[in-house]
Amino acid sequence: MHCIRKVTDDLVWVGANDRRLALFEGVYSVPAGVSYNSYLLTDEKTVLFDTVDKAVRQRFLENVEVALKGRKLDYLVVQHVEPDHSAVIPDLIRQHPEIKIVCSARVLEFIKQFYNFDIDSRVHLVEENETLNTGKHTLQFIMAPMVHWPEVMMTYDSTAKILFSADAFGCFGALNGALFADEVDFAKDYMDETRRYYSNIVGKYGVQVESALDKASALNIEMICPLHGFVWRSNLSEIISKYMLWSKYEPEERGVMIAYASVYGNTENAAEILACRLRDKGIKTVVFDVSVTPASEIVSAAFKWSHLVFASTTYNAGIFVTMEALINDLAAHNIQNRRVAIIENGSWAPTSGGLIREILGKCEKINFLENNVSILSGIKAAQLSDIESMAQAIGADFTAPSGVNQNNQAALNTVDPAAMFKLSYGLFVLTARDGNKDNGCIINTVMQITVTPVKITIGVNKANYTHDMILKTGKFNISVLSEGVPFRVFQQFGFHSGKDTDKFASSGEALRTPNGVRYLSEWTNGVISGEVKESIDCGTHTLFIAEVNQAFSLSRDPSVTYQYYFDNIKPKPQPPKGNKKGFVCKICGYVHEGDTLPDDFICPLCKHGAKDFEPI
Ligand code: FEO
């Protein structure tokens, strides 16, 4: 029986899912299956965009017939000839011999290589930016070579503002009844599989993806229809911003991915110890055993994290087999722009470290940490201190003020657009540094005002000591608070003045951005470093206009909004005992018992005045 979904009034998804595929392309595990998307436009002419894999041939052919409602099929647009999208073309032609195949010369060449039907009599060749009118709709064809094969073409429906994006913006995973990305919790459930799809399928071709993104940026796109995964009809920036990062090989998150290959557990031991020492410093870590985790997942993680550590035993005088495969895989996928550290092990002749360095050294912008660790069989005291040194050297990248660790400035001085999207009318810890004094306060006014360059405004109360520090130094950090932040953070930064308190006294190790200013690593989903370009006196507050010179994401947790703070974080005022009357501070929840509140009353907790109190 057919199984279709409406995309728009005249566009229908006629694809299908496959949950029995063992390995996509014979290489990539797809435990949650995969979808093969095809779309039918029913305008004055009928137009089908690509076909599907042979595994779902029968369902697809039935879907097309049902969606056509007895009409003939006028055009098949072939954007990509890889057989997971073209295998059913011969069947479709047998069913609809009148069909015209719309494709590029390169697609034509590939179709002839793969199939034996007569295409010359039914081909309609198109070139870059050529258009085809189908009635109400006008289709514009855009070449996107190497995203993922050389013949790839995308199609822009300028009437409906839909981009049919071929493999780009695709995702592993069956659709499970959903079709649109906004029907699922995409960030939580599908972003990892989107990254794994991107990094393994088109990760090698960052330059070509950038070129396709450039072309797409000139179009007014309201919907993206890829060949795998979900249709994007809202919040397109969520996926586009990821592609902007991935195509430039920019890390998505600051943290350390540790991949180890261990035969008897000693190399694993070293990897685990390093992970613990890094966590001690507040640095995020993920750890993979390369003999257990599929390489595609580790390649994907390497595209995500800023720092990579490879720990491998030596095997037959070389790199351990599974690690060697991973390292070659990473190099083949063009991994670049990463800070890399190596731990090697070998009972009589450790060589794996040098060999890993040799392979990765050929990749672009790989900055090796010099504090490597070499183990002879098991960890002894000397190696323990080497691991600690490695953790410290990596930690320096996360705490270093400007000038330290120049090697990694490329990774550090990036502006991740995803971090900018975390902004809301929310709550932020604003930090600054003057000489040796660190300070911070809570603010709720951060707004992005331009994209090129990225500029933001912040409004800061003149009574705050942080205000004076920023006025003097021109530098600050914004830590975007995320849901889950405890009330004590607001007490720590909001309820007293840095003039007479060290607000960081109870904090752990100082994490700093390259501008030397501290930031919060916990309960923070993004960090933004600003340099003041202008300031405007707004009476009680100063409005600082600043250029962003670094921004990075720390988690996917939602940002705290003021509403969320009041509903979920701020303690609910407890009524005064007995029949006593009282007033509650709207800022911090402090309760003043009494029938009246003096006009000059100052909250003993947060120092706000009587106007911020309300009767209970
Ligand atoms: Fe889904 Fe490159 O094919």
Image (spheres, rainbow, N blue to C red):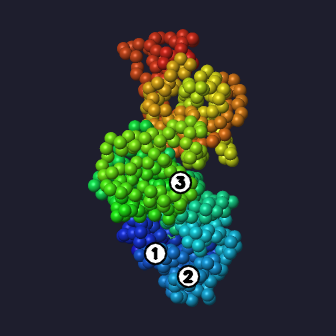
- Disc 3 is placed on an element classified as strand
Above or below — where is 353 with respect to 66? above
The answer to whether the residue labelled 2 contacts the one labelled 1, judged by CB atoms less than 8 Å apart, is no
Instruction: Classify residue 299 by image quadrant.
Output: bottom left
- Disc 1 is placed on an element classified as loop
Give the residue at x 61% y 68%: 144
Would you say 121 lies left or right of 38 here? right
The answer to whether the residue labelled 2 contacts the one labelled 3, judged by CB atoms less than 8 Å apart, is no
- Disc 2 is placed on an element classified as helix
- Which one is nearer the viewer's eye here, 442 or 179? 442
- Find the distance from the CA under tag 2 to the CA under tag 3: 39 Å
Report the residue marked by disc 1. Answer: 53
Choose the circle earlier in sequence order: 2 or 1: 1
Report the residue marked by disc 3. Answer: 366
**Amino acid type of disc 3?**
Ile
Would you say 150 lies left or right of 372 here? right
Residue found at the far left of this picture: 264
